[in-house]
């Protein structure tokens, strides 16, 4: 599918670049994510996510011969199988559902990505039954998608939409600090969960930050072409 406003169509290589960028950010933030989880969880979120995305990159070493949806589904399956706790089924299931939504088409655009990420959110909420305000992944994911769509409707391109999504995800991430957890392991702590940033929401913010970086890198390459 053609891109909007001059955007080059996106392909499987773009998806793999996105996942590699995310894996790198998770590796850099592994200890921080684990520290966040130590306060309200099992103290293994960063370790598990790093292991899972490292395995995902090994499982999909190249994009040749694959569709964008196939890459996302393969990554999602690997995350489900290697990341412990709730994070594996939630993050992995979300990515796998996004891949299924993209289907077998060789190219996609920002609108397709929006639809795919919505499918990912539906998977996450279907499994975790969480809503905004429950101190989970959803607190970062929902505002990110809303900001992404608003920017597209205003005529923005993928890079600007991803930037708005990243900003909203980070704001949603920070909004979890004063919340009392109502879902997941943290909910067992009751009022003691207040005052701590949710690690899942933090990883979700990294997901959108990685998307922004990948989109800007692809845009820079496109602009350099004669």
Image (spheres, rainbow, N blue to C red):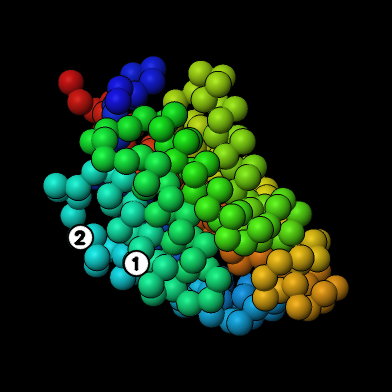
Q: How many marks?
A: 2
Q: In this rendered view, identify the residue nearer to me: 222 or 71.
A: 71
Q: In terms of secondary structure, where does tag 1 sit? A: helix
User: Which residue is pictured at 42% across the width and 37% down the height?
Assistant: 113
- Residue beneath label 1, please? 78
Q: Eyeballing the image, is 218 above or below 120?
A: above
Residue 169 seen in the current view: no
Left or right: 163 as drawn, with respect to 130: left
Q: Residue 216 sits in which quadrant?
A: top left
Q: Residue 189 sits in which quadrant?
A: bottom right
Residue 224 seen in the current view: yes
Residue found farthest to the left: 65
Residue 64: % across, % down: 14, 48
User: Which residue is pictured at 44% across the width and 41% down the height?
Assistant: 116
Q: Give the quarter of the figure containing the C terminus.
A: top left
- Residue beneath label 2, please? 61
Badge 1: residue crowd in 10 Å (few <14, some 14–19, many ≥20): many
Q: Eyeballing the image, is 1 above or below 137?
A: above
Q: Give the quarter of the figure containing the N terminus.
A: top left
User: Which residue is pictured at 44% across the width and 73% down the height?
Assistant: 83
């Amino acid at each position: 599918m053609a891109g909007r406003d001059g955007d080059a169509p996106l392909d499987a290589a773009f998806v793999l670049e996105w996942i590699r960028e995310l894996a790198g950010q998770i590796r850099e933030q592994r200890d921080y994510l684990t520290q966040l989880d130590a306060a309200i969880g099992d103290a293994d979120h960063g370790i598990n996510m790093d292991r899972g995305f490292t395995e995902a990159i090994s499982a999909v070493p190249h994009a040749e011969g694959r569709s964008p949806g196939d890459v996302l589904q393969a990554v999602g399956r690997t995350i489900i199988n290697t990341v412990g706790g709730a994070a594996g089924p939630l993050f992995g299931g979300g990515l796998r559902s996004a891949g299924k939504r993209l289907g077998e088409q060789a190219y996609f655009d920002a609108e397709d990505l929006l639809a795919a990420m919505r499918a990912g959110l539906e998977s996450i909420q279907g499994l975790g039954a969480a809503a905004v305000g429950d101190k989970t992944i959803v607190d970062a994911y929902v505002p990110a998608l809303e900001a992404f769509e608003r920017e597209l409707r205003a005529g923005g391109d993928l890079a600007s939409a991803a930037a708005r999504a990243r900003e909203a995800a980070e704001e949603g991430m920070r909004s979890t600090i004063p919340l009392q957890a109502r879902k997941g392991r943290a909910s067992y702590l009751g009022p003691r969960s207040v005052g701590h940033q949710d690690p899942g929401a933090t990883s979700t913010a990294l997901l959108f930050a990685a998307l922004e970086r990948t989109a800007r890198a692809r845009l820079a390459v496109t602009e350099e072409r004669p």
